Amino acid sequence: MDSHDLRRTYVFSGQVQGVGFRMTSQRIAADYPVRGYVRNLDDGRVELVVEGEPATLDAYEAALSARMGGYIDRTQRKEEPAAGGFEGFRIRF
C-alpha cells in the first residue's frame, strides 16, 4: 500500500443483482493493481470497496462503467485515504 492510495466505496443502484455484476467487477479487478471487495446488499444494491492509486482507480471505474453501466441507475461514491487490510479483490457473500 502506498501513502497516496485511496479507498473508494461505491453503492450501485439499478438492475445490478442477478446480471453478473460481482463476477464482472472481480474479473476487471484482475487487470488492475487494486484491492477490495464487492457484495450484494439486501436491498438490491451492490457495494464495491476498492483501494489503489488514484489513476488506477479511475481506470478501473471506467472499465467497470463501460461493461456494466447499462445496469446502473445511480451511483453513490465516497473517497477517503486507503486503510489497507485487503488482499486481492474478492466477492463477499
Image (cartoon, rainbow, N blue to C red):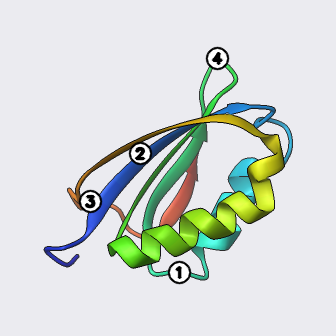
What amino acid is at disc 1? Tyr
The CA distance from mark 1 to mark 4 is 29 Å
Q: Please state if 25 lies on the left or on the right of 53 as rendered.
A: right
Give the CA separation, mark 1 to mark 3.
Answer: 17 Å
Q: Residues within 10 Å of mark 2 (few under 14, many from 20)?
A: some
Viewer-nearest of labels 2 and 3?
2
41 displayed left or right of 35: right
Describe the element under mark 3 as helix, strand or loop.
loop
The residue sitting at the top extreme is 43
- Answer with left or right where residue 4 lies relative to residue 18: left
Residue 86 vertical position relative to residue 80 in the rendered view, above or below: below
Q: Looking at the rendering, in which quadrant would you find the C terminus?
A: top right
- Give the foreground label among 1 and 3: 1
Q: Quick one: label 1 or label 3, which is nearer the N terminus?
A: 1
Residue position for label 4? 43
Tell me the kind of residue under disc 2.
Answer: Thr
Q: Earlier in the sequence, mark 2 or mark 4?
A: 2
Residue 85's label in the rendered image is: 3
- Dot 1: few (<14), some (14–19), or many (≥20) neighbours within 10 Å? some
Identify residue for label 1. 32
Query: Relative to residue 26, is residue 84 drawn left or right?
Result: left
Residue 7, above or below 40: below
Say above or below: 81 vs 19.
Answer: below
Residue 93 is at least partly visible in this image: no
The tag earlier along the polypeptide, 1 or 2, is 2
Amino acid carrying mark 4 in the image: Asp
Q: What is the number of callouts on the image?
A: 4
With respect to residue 44, does 70 lie above or below? below
Q: Earlier in the sequence, mark 4 or mark 3?
A: 4
Task: Give the image location of residue 82, x and y in percent.
Answer: 23, 59
